[in-house]
Amino acid sequence: MNQPILLKPLAVRFGLLCFAMAAVLSPVAALGAEESPAAPIALNPANPHYFLFRGKPTFLLGSTEHYGAVLNGDFDYARYLDTLQKGGMNLTRLFSGAYVEPSGAFNIAKNTLAPEGRRFLCPWARSETDGYAGGGRKFDLEKWDEAYFTRLKDFITQAGRHGVVVEVVLFCPYYDEAQWALSPLNARNNVNSVGDIQRTDANTLHNGKLLETQQAMVRKIAGELKGFDNLYYEICNEPYFGGVALDWQYRILDTLADAEKDLPRKHLVAQNISNGSKKIEKPNLGISIFNFHYATPPEAVAVNYDLGKVIGDDETGFKGTGDEVYRMEAWEFFLAGGGSFDHLDYSFTVGHEDGTFEFPPKQPGGGGTALRKQFRILRDFLGGFDFVALRPDHESLKSPLPGGTTAHMLSQPGEVYALYLHGGSQLTIKLALPAGRYHVEWVNPRSGGTDKTQAIDHPGGEVSLQSPAYAQDVAVRILKSRP
């Protein structure tokens, strides 16, 4: 039985008191955020398809708001981050403010990336001149908005306290004129006559003085965020739209690298490659994370696994309001060998930062408490393994699957197998396993319950395993038993 603290020796009680006071007086240092000497999240040296974060093997899983937590001045991010932590999520995406959306964009109700004009915050300060297209005064691209950077740093500090890693997205294409019309980088919205160009030239090396402004923003953000361990950067969201040039992306990458050249601990950088899948033929050595959107089936992992970097699926959310499609995408992506996944969760809005907004049936995507619980089941399933020791396994499953059924598996052959099956309602699978005694569990991805367990003494070769009845999908955990 543990002793009450009051019965402990005086010196111990004094030490506990000092530690508690230090945590109260300097919570940032105590909790490993801005002033922390901790190294930033990094690729895991034991298996660079995953991360190392605060000394622990890590994969990243999020179900998050639409990237406006900082630029939308009405959004209560403290409540939001608390909800993420309680739901077991450890990733969120964040747009810098160089891009903002009008209300109603993409048919998203209560879009956090579409703040009321005067509540829009970005790296640049407002001028004394009226006329911003979204309402209020224009921006001065030669002056920083310190209130924005205070909010940005506080967001990442609080995220760090909640164990949440932030993907800081520097730029985004202007999909059509409606987004470009609201950008501070459009000459009509600033007093500096910068950005008097076509929207499709904005993210290219042929954008006039705009490039200098973009590079200055990158250096400023890098300088402000240099001490945080719970972030990495993405150069540009969905650069395959809106005329974004590859050489411009690499110029931004070089600018970021130069801004961090004197830091003892540099941050990882991600590049968004495509929707779906694409084989990366000439990877830039400065990129550590290759992101895809709507990456189902998860072919992007298989065709790029040999790069030895994290493969991420950092946006889903345009396939209707049901849960199954997003649950399936997450399970398949991780069980194929992916290292990060973020779902676009439309239940997070201003006034519903706890993720309880009841979005309309015509919303482009879904989200909500029930889906986040299902993601947590996935987190607990994969986190229950020494996942860094696992690799994609395309050999052990020997039986042909019924039509409409898919399978993805990670394994440490002869020791551990993690299998996800989608489709059908009951089936028998054949696995090639070395000789040994194994414990088999069939896990329900919707409830988290174990629907069937069995122990097998296997002489080696193929073994048949019959699933329980299931609806839509089932996961299998196979562990070699020790004497």
Image (cartoon, helix red, strand yellow):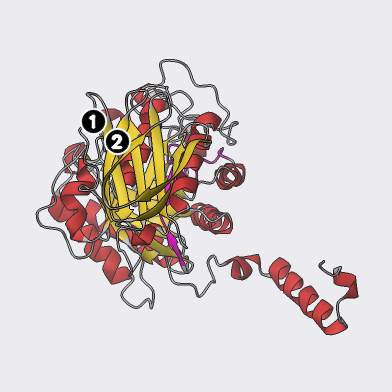
* Percent x, y of residue 229: 46, 65
Taking the image as drawn, is residue 181 in sight? no
| In the foreground, 429 or 265 | 429
- Place residue 257 in its image quadrant: bottom left
Circle 1 residue = 401
Circle 2 residue = 429
Mark positioned earlier in the residue sequence (2 or 1): 1
* Percent x, y of residue 203: 21, 47
| In the foreground, 101 or 41 | 41
Region of the chain picked out in magenta, as a range: 56-75
The answer to whether residue 117 is magenta is no
Label 2: few (<14), some (14–19) or many (≥20) C-alpha neighbours in 10 Å: some
Mark 1 and mark 2 in contact (Cβ < 8 Å)? yes
Residue most extreme to the left: 281
The quarter of the image holding the N terminus is bottom right
Q: How many marks?
A: 2
- Place residue 199 in its image quadrant: top left
